Image (spheres, rainbow, N blue to C red):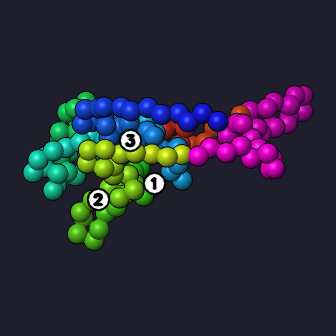
Amino acid sequence: MQEIKKVLSLHQRDYYETHLSIINCILPIKLTPKEIEVLACFMSLEGDITNYRFGRLGKKVVMDYLRIQSSGLANYMRDLKKKSMLKEDSNGNITILPILLPGDKVQEYRFRLMKDTTSVPPPVSSSIDIIIEDDTTEVAMPIKHKQEEEEYA
């Protein structure tokens, strides 16, 4: 067995985006690429704005950088809250789930991937086939999950 190693030296926003992409595989609820990008932008804010990163100014910086409208950002933030990646307290203060925050300067990972040969593998497709019968034909139609069909502004 060969150990795979790689050292990356990344700038601020890329550091957070790469970190979120790496840990996404172990999260119980996966983030979409755009959710990773939005969250990484908030995480990369520096200076005094970090105390209120989800305030009006922080949101404006993120919207300008990603070139999205406030309604689009609101949708991403709503979804991140539903996935429990962002937490809002009773005062309306929003914080990032601590497990998502990497070290300030360095973050190391150690994964062990093991092949399980004792159990039945999960199905490859996440779609469901439904058979619709009428008098003349049978048609198999793949049904996609609602989350896959959602688009953001």
Three-letter code for the amino acid on which mark 1 is drawn:
Lys
Q: Which residue is mark 2?
A: 95
The reply to whether the magenta stretch includes residue 136 is: yes
Picture quarter with the C terminus: top left
Q: Which mark is residue 139?
A: none
Identify whether 59 is placed above or below 139.
Answer: below
Q: Which mark is residue 83?
A: 1
Earlier sequence position, callout 2 versus callout 1? 1
Give the residue displayed 54% in from the left and 53% down from the top. 28
Three-letter code for the amino acid on which mark 3 is drawn:
His
Secondary structure beneath label 3: helix
Residue 104 % position (x, y)? 25, 48
Q: Which residues make up the magenta segment?
A: 112-141
Question: Main SS type for the magenta part?
Answer: loop
Earlier sequence position, callout 3 versus callout 2? 3
Q: CA distance from mark 3 to mark 2?
A: 18 Å
Give the residue displayed 80% in from the left and 50% down from the top. 119
Give the residue displayed 85% in from the left and 35% down from the top. 134
Residue 148 % position (x, y)? 55, 38
Q: Is residue 113 left or right of residue 19?
A: right
Q: Is residue 47 left or right of residue 43?
A: left
Residue reaching furthest to the bottom:
90
Residue 50 % position (x, y)? 17, 51
Q: Which residue is mark 3?
A: 19
In this rendered view, identify the residue nearer to me: 116 or 72. Answer: 116
Verify CB contact (< 8 Å) between mark 1 and mark 3: no
Three-letter code for the amino acid on which mark 2 is drawn:
Thr
Q: Is residue 81 visible?
A: no
